[in-house]
Amino acid sequence: MTQPIFCQTPTRGFVNLAYARKVCFRKVHYNMAWQFACVIIWSNGEKESFFGKDAKVIVQTLEKMK
């Protein structure tokens, strides 16, 4: 069984990063401004996007794991 890696995002609640297969970070043009974005491809193949503060919290959580 996989050890949970919980990350609490400001607007989307808790995210368990243990099931992330791939995590990509980039700047995107969103809502007429450049924002930091995070796209997670989960172990079941689904994709989920996080923007702004949510993406930054995910980066910080992953940095703590190193």
Image (cartoon, rainbow, N blue to C red):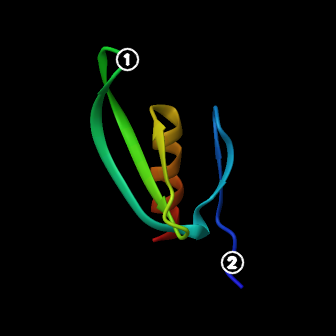
Q: Residue furthest bottom?
A: 1
What x and y, as percent, mark residue 21? 46, 70
| Depth check, front residue: 39 or 47 | 47
The amino acid pointed to by label 2 is Gln
Q: Residue furthest top?
A: 32
| Residue with the mark numbered 1 | 31
The amino acid pointed to by label 1 is Asn
Q: Is residue 58 left or right of residue 39?
A: right
Q: How many marks?
A: 2
| Depth check, front residue: 52 or 31 | 31
Q: Is residue 29 left or right of residue 45?
A: left
Q: Is residue 37 left or right of residue 43?
A: left
| Residue with the mark numbered 2 | 3
Which residue is located at x 64 percent, y 66 percent?
A: 5
What x and y, as percent, mark residue 6? 67, 59
Which residue is located at x 69 percent, y 70 percent?
A: 4
| Residue 66 vertical position relative to residue 27 in the rendered view, above or below | below
Give me the disc on residue 17. none
What x and y, as percent, mark residue 64? 51, 63
Q: Secondary structure at mark 2?
A: loop
Q: Secondary structure at mark 1?
A: loop
- Check the picture and name the quadrant holding the N terminus: bottom right
| Residue 32 vertical position relative to residue 14 in the rendered view, above or below | above
What x and y, as percent, mark residue 52? 45, 32
Disc 2 + disc 1, Cβ < 8 Å? no
State the separation of the CA atoms marked 2 and 1.
Answer: 36 Å
Identify the mark nearer the N-term, 2 or 1: 2
State which quadrant residue 66 falls in.
bottom left
Q: Residues within 10 Å of mark 2 (few under 14, many from 20)?
A: few
Which residue is located at x 69 percent, y 77 percent?
A: 3
Disc number lying in front (2 or 1): 1
